[in-house]
Image: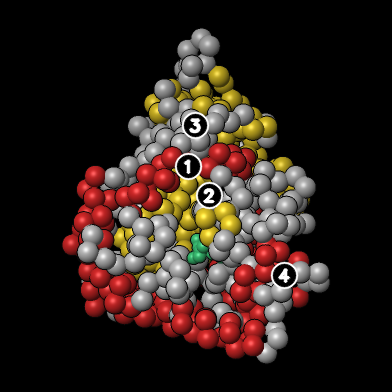
Amino acid sequence: MGILIKNGRIVTAIDEFVGDVYCDEGTIRAIGENLDHRPGDEVIDASGQLVMPGGLDPHVHMELPFMGTVSADDFESGTAAGVAGGTTSIIDFVIPARDEDLMDALAAWHDKASKAVADYAFHMAVTWWGDQTKEWMTRCVRDEGITSFKTFMAYRGAIGVDDPELIEVMKTSKELGSLVTVHAEHGDMVVELQNKLFGQGLTAPKYHALSRPPAVEGEATARALMMSRMTGQPVYVVHVTCKESVDAIIAARMNGVDVYGETCTQYLLLDDSVYDKPDFEGAAYVMSPPIRPRGHQEVLWNALKLGALHTVATDHCPFNQVGQKDRGKDDFRSIPNGAAGIENRLALLYTYGVLEDRLTLNEFVDLTSTRAAKIFGLYPRKGSITVGADADIVVWDPAASGTISAKTHAHRCDRSIFEGFETKGTPSYVIVDGRVQCREGKLDVERGAGRYLRRTLA
Ligand code: URP
Ligand code: ZN
Ligand code: ZN
């Protein structure tokens, strides 16, 4: 059965026009005016609504073993929450333990991801350097459809790498033509500050933020980009939160460094007063890097506009307050880092970006879908409304409004870091690979229907 979406305002990263889109067998077959359809096809009247490429979230962690627990959304519930919010594909991170065979970790991730309801790809984290690491990286690019690697400059003693290891990753990636993504925080300084604060008896969630100030992130960003410049390896800096990092990215770009920057919804919309909430509620906002003082938000919005930052992701990595975050009740260093967000990304960016005149509709599509597809080797299959692309489409009702709450969200998490945020605009229909998986706001997803996306070198 095909699907005809009629009379919608079709919005891509560059165009905006009223027309019809016809999809069949999971693919966009035609775009035009007054398109025909076959008997039995579903016809969706999108008059007065926007028709956009499905969202692509390039930074999520489903079912991630981390800090002694496992992130609460698995691939089924997490991709379903994405679909509820208009995100139709994700890129998750395979994160091997230190000394683990990268290929064994990849097999484990494939196993976990087989229950996804929407399409998924992987970045491979290089968490240690050994005799076989170069061979494994080569296999990722040549045989496994993984064309980007993740490195953590934070999380020392666990999944973090040191500078010589990071340099090896960059040199190898340069030979392979792949991309290196970087979590930029000065890992040793974080440990130093954590221990100093804890040693003074300061144990509450707010000290998580104070142990990871903007200077710690800015320095690491600049250092990673210096390595990028020296090795000639393009770098994508994940979850940029602060002016210091934006400045480092702009300076590197001015020096010809091939660098992309990502920020996340929470860093655009929240400020560090969240850590002052009573009764350990600040723990819900413990993530790395932390939520910053208010002034940084405007810098991030401006950097998106300027083109110094290129994508808005979520770093979706939920942990429940009860049973997970409370592991760190007496020690902020033990609070699992991360929060939920995949369901809310489009509505928040539409409400506080487009409707507040910070972003155009084309920029909205680019930042939430198209640019990530281009950077990570999925375009035009994903991130576009073109004939031949996957039929991943969001019909967006701009008139709908809502209020975000943990009581009603699809995330498997007992808290929402956006609790009480008002939103305008919501998906009325979400089509994933040619199947309507959300109809008039009601989810109708199929466990295991998601496919693994092999990526090509961009
Ligand atoms: O706090 C975070 N960001 N948790 C997920 C892991 C990471 O660093 O991206
Ligand atoms: Zn990170
Ligand atoms: Zn992350």
**Front position among marks 1 and 3:** 1
Assign a secondary structure to mark 1: helix
Q: Is residue 412 left or right of residue 360?
A: right
Q: Are marks 1 and 3 in contact (CB under 8 Å)?
A: no
Which of disc 1 and disc 4 is earlier in sequence?
Answer: 1
Q: Are marks 1 and 2 in contact (CB under 8 Å)?
A: yes
Identify the residue position indicated by label 2 in the image. 62
Identify the residue position indicated by label 4 in the image. 329
Q: Is residue 282 left or right of residue 122?
A: right
Locate residue 305, reporting x and y percent. 50, 66
Please indicate, yes or no, whether residue 365 appears anywhere in the rendered image.
no
Q: Which mark is residue 369?
A: none
Assign a secondary structure to mark 3: loop
Q: CA distance from mark 4 to mark 2?
A: 24 Å
Assign a secondary structure to mark 4: loop
Q: Which mark is residue 112?
A: 1
Which of disc 2 and disc 4 is earlier in sequence?
Answer: 2
Q: Tag 4: residue type?
A: Lys
